[in-house]
Image (tube, rainbow, N blue to C red):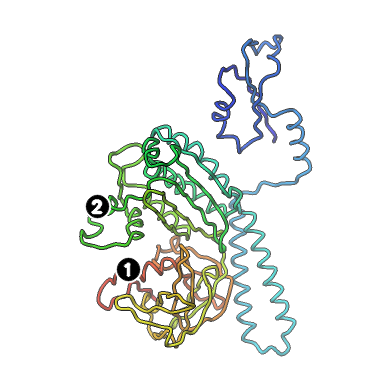
Amino acid sequence: AYLAWDFVIDTTAGRDALEAVFEFVADECELDIRSAETPPAASDPAVTPVASPSLELAPTTERRQGDRRSGERSSTIRVDIDRIDRLVNMVGEIVITQAMLSQFIGQLHTEGFGALGQGLEAMAQHTRELQESVMSVRAQPVKSVFARMPRLVRELATALGKEVRLITVGEGTEVDKTVIEQLSDPLVHMVRNAIDHGIEMPDVRAAKGKPREGTIVLSAEHRSGRIVIEIKDDGAGINRERVRQKCIERGLIGADQVLEPDEIDNLIFAPGLSTAEQLSDISGRGVGMDVVKRNIQELGGRVHIRSTPGQGSRFTLSLPLTLAVLDGMIVSVGANRYVVPLTNIIESLRPQTSAVTRLVNRGHVLAIRGEYVQLVYVHELFDIADAVTDATRGLVVLVEVEGGDKIGLVVDEILGQQQVVIKSLETNYSQIEGISAATILGDGKVALILDVSGIRQLAAAPPTGAGEPALKLAS
C-alpha cells in the first residue's frame, strides 16, 4: 500500500525548525517540505483559509504516481520471520549432512567412486550458495538502528546543556536481522555515556582549545568476515584515576594493585560501577556498560576500548555477520577437537626451538618476523590430558584478536577446514569463558568453537590456584 498525507502548517517558524520536528521520519518515507504556493480554497468547508505564510508537508503528486508505477514494476512478497528461521535451520542441517557424507566418502577407496565424489563436490557448492542466499534474505542495513540516534543525541545534549554533533558512517552495512534486533540497546547505552561522561561542557572545551561543539562518530563496516561498529568521541577520555578509586572503594581491586592503562579502562565494564557524581535520569545508577558487554558477548561479539586522556575515547564492537554458520579450522588437542574461526587465523607453523622463549611469570613467547607473540597452550586452559606440551612438537596457530593484537594457540595438529553450523551454548547450557559456541562435526560428534579474544583474557588472568586450570571441560 502507498499512503500519503498532506499537512498544511500555519507557523512563523523557519524551515530548519520544521525539519528538526520531522527528522524522526525522514528516513522512513518520501518527505517534502515546501512553502505553500496558494492558500487552501475557501470553498473547502474543512479548511479555514489563512493569510499568513504557511508551510506544506507533502509528497508531490508526480512522486506518488512514480511510487505507484515502481511498485507495479517490482515484485515483492512479505514472509514471516519464523519461516525464514526454519529455512536457516534446515540449511544448517543440510550443511551437517553434507559434512557427514564428505567424511564417509573420504574413507572409501577412490577407485570406482569418481562420479560420486564429483557429485558430492557439486552438492557442497550448491549448499554454500543456498546458505549465502538464505543469509542475504535475513540481512538488513544498520541504518534502522543508526536512524534512532540523531534524536537521542539532540534531546540528551539539550538536557545536559552541551553542544554535540553526530556523524554516521556506513549506514548501508548489512548484518543478520537477529544481530540488528539486539544491537539497539547497547548502542543507545554507549552513545548516552559518550555524551554524559565523554563530551565536556562548551565552556570547558573552549578553555582547552577545543571547539565548543563536541563530535560523536558512529560508524559501521565489514572487516574480516565480521561487522565492526565504532563509537568515537572527542571528549575528555576515561578518567582512569577516578575509575581506579571507585573500583578500590567497591573492593574490585586492591589499593596496592598495579594496573596497565588499558586494564583500568576495561574496569568500566564491572557490574554496578559508576563514576557519576550524583544520581540522575541519565547516569549514576551503576547499570549500563556491564549490560552492554554481556549483550555483545551473547551475540558472539566483543568490545574493545581505546581512550586517550583529553582527546576522547573509541569503543569498538566486533560482531559476527550471522549467527548461523561459519568457516572454521578444526584442530585437535589431546582427544578433543576444537574449531578456530577462519577469519581470525593468520597462519599456522611448527616453530623452531630457538624461536620459543620462556619469560619469567609470563609464559612462552614466539619470535616471528621481528616481533614477539604470546603462546597460549590450549591444553592448559581446558585441562586436557595426553596433549602435546611442547610447541616445537605441535603446531602454533597464529590468530588475530580484537585490537589487532596476535596470540599463538598451541595445538596438537590441524585436521582440516570445514563450514560448521553454530549451536548456541547460552541457549542450551550457559556461557563458558573462551568458548563462543558449539557445532556438530561430520562424524556426529560435538566440537567447541573457540573465542580467541576470550582465550587471551583467560591466559592473562591470574591463576585460580596452585596447579588448577583456569577452566575445566568434560570430554
Say which element carries label 2: helix
Quarter of the image for residue 67 reads top right
Residue ID at (61%, 69%): 95
Of residues 365 and 191, which is closer to you in this image? 365
Give the labeled residue for mark 2: 245
Of residues 318 and 93, which is closer to you in this image? 318
Quarter of the image for residue 110 reads bottom right
Which quadrant does the C terminus fall into? bottom left
Say which element carries label 1: loop
Q: Residues within 10 Å of mark 2 (few under 14, many from 20)?
A: some
Amino acid at dot 1: Ala
168 shown above or below 341:
above
Give the labeled residue for mark 1: 461
4 shown above or below 278:
above
Rendering coords of residue 236 (x, y %): 37, 46
Rendering coords of residue 395 (x, y %): 48, 83
Residue ID at (76%, 45%): 74
